[in-house]
Image (cartoon, grey):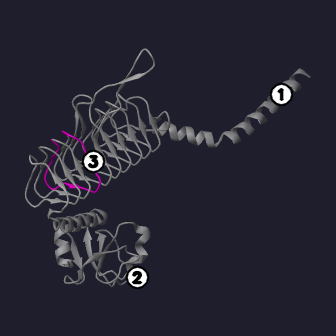
């Protein structure tokens, strides 16, 4: 599948410098790309590769200044990184659209239904009253429990397990091994020291344009719904507990965990390996640094770090001071010695 510079420029609203008929059929890193490949330059530290790259077409920022002749056709755009991501998404979408039909063996309950142009891979299981929207792709070994609903243009990668009654929206991507709708961690302590399981009878709702990485787990609600709102992006190996809400366009990096009933606002950024206790609020636009332990609510727009997490700016100041402690200790001892000398001289 080949694309010309003119076609690509149209897709990314770019301006061509060079041959509009130059064509590409693959992608490559600017330092490694060969003839017939498309690359991009967004980070200035890779700028020298522009003049040695064998790529046929290179996407660059509007304000990039070319200092030497360039063999490749350039396409100038406002944001090269975003434009390149758009093209990769379009390419992936075209490749995925080629998948259609139902592979065998698989199990589809009599009461299950699916829309047009769907793909259901081998060994998939679709339970009673499962519904799939148009153009949705279900890869091999996926399990969809009874009454699960999957929207349109959604991709469920191999080995994903979606329990009964869970709802997945449109244009969602769920990567391999993720489990949606397993029981929340609910156990009531008993007088004899044992724990009585609290049934988890709610579900999980994943809204539109959400992407969830590999081997993540999102627990069903005790009552009601655990909700991942539209535009949110979750990395690999994330634990979302029962009745949590993750707001619109929030991002959570790998190995983070969010405890039950915590509400995360919109536009929140959470770094890798962060841990968040239950029943608190993370305000809109808050930033939680990697490996932070968040034990209380975070105000909108605030950045926190550390364990327990506290104000990011204050934490940086504390770190700067702590690095100077050996020097401060030395100066303190010198001052103590000087004071003793002055006291002795005064007494003498």
Q: Are marks 1 and 3 in contact (CB under 8 Å)?
A: no
Q: Quadrant of the C terminus?
A: top right
Q: Which residues are magenta?
A: 147-165
- Residue holding disc 2: 52
Would you say 153 lies left or right of 57 here? left
Q: Earlier in the sequence, mark 2 or mark 1?
A: 2
- Residue holding disc 3: 161
Say which of marks 2 and 3 sits in front. 3
Seen from the viewer's position, the closer of residues 39 and 115 is 115
Say which of marks 1 and 3 sits in front. 3
Q: Residue furthest top?
A: 191
Q: Position of residue 135 (x, y in %)?
A: 13, 58
Q: Position of residue 259 (x, y in %)?
A: 37, 33
Give above or below for 189 relative to 281. above
Point out which mark residue 176 bears: none
Give above or below for 114 relative to 293. below
Residue at the image position 22 percent from the left and 60 percent from the top: 122
Q: Magenta stretch containing residue 155, yes or no?
A: yes
Would you say 290 lies left or right of 19 here? right
Give above or below for 333 relative to 79. above
Q: CA distance from mark 2 to mark 1?
A: 69 Å
- Residue holding disc 1: 340
Query: What is the quadrant of residue 32 in the picture?
Result: bottom left
Q: CA distance from mark 2 to mark 3?
A: 47 Å
Secondary structure under the numbered disc 3 in the rendered image = strand
């Amino acid at each position: 599948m080949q694309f010309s510079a003119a076609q690509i420029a149209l897709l990314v609203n770019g301006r061509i410098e060079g041959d509009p008929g130059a064509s590409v059929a693959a992608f490559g890193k600017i330092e490694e790309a060969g003839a017939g490949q498309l690359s991009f330059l967004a980070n200035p530290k890779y700028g020298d590769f522009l003049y040695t790259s064998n790529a046929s077409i290179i996407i660059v920022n509007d304000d990039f200044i070319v200092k030497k002749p360039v063999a490749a056709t350039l396409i100038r755009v406002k944001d090269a990184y975003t434009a390149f991501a758009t093209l990769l998404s379009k390419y992936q979408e075209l490749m995925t659209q080629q998948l259609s039909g139902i592979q065998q063996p698989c199990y589809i309950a009599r009461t299950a239904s699916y829309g047009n142009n769907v793909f259901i891979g081998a060994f998939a299981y679709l339970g009673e009253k499962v519904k799939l929207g148009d153009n949705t792709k279900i890869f091999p070994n996926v399990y969809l429990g009874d009454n699960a609903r999957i929207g349109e243009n959604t991709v469920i990668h191999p080995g994903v397990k979606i329990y009964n009654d869970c709802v997945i929206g449109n244009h969602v991507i769920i990567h391999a091994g993720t489990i949606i709708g397993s029981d929340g961690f609910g156990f009531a302590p008993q007088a004899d020291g044992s724990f009585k399981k609290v049934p988890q009878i709610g579900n999980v709702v994943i809204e539109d344009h959400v992407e969830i990485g590999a081997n993540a787990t999102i627990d069903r609600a005790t009552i009601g719904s655990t909700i991942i709102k539209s535009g949110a992006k979750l990395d690999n190996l994330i634990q979302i507990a029962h009745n949590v809400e993750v707001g619109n366009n929030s991002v959570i990096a790998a190995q983070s965990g969010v405890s039950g009933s915590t509400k995360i606002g919109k536009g929140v950024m959470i770094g890798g390996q962060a841990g968040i206790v239950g029943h608190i609020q993370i305000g809109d636009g808050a930033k939680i640094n990697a490996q932070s332990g968040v034990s209380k609510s975070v105000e909108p727009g605030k950045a926190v770090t550390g364990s327990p997490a506290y104000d990011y700016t204050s934490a940086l100041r504390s770190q700067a001071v702590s690095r100077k402690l050996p020097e401060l200790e030395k100066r303190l001892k010198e001052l103590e010695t000087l004071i003793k000398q002055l006291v002795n001289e005064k007494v003498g």
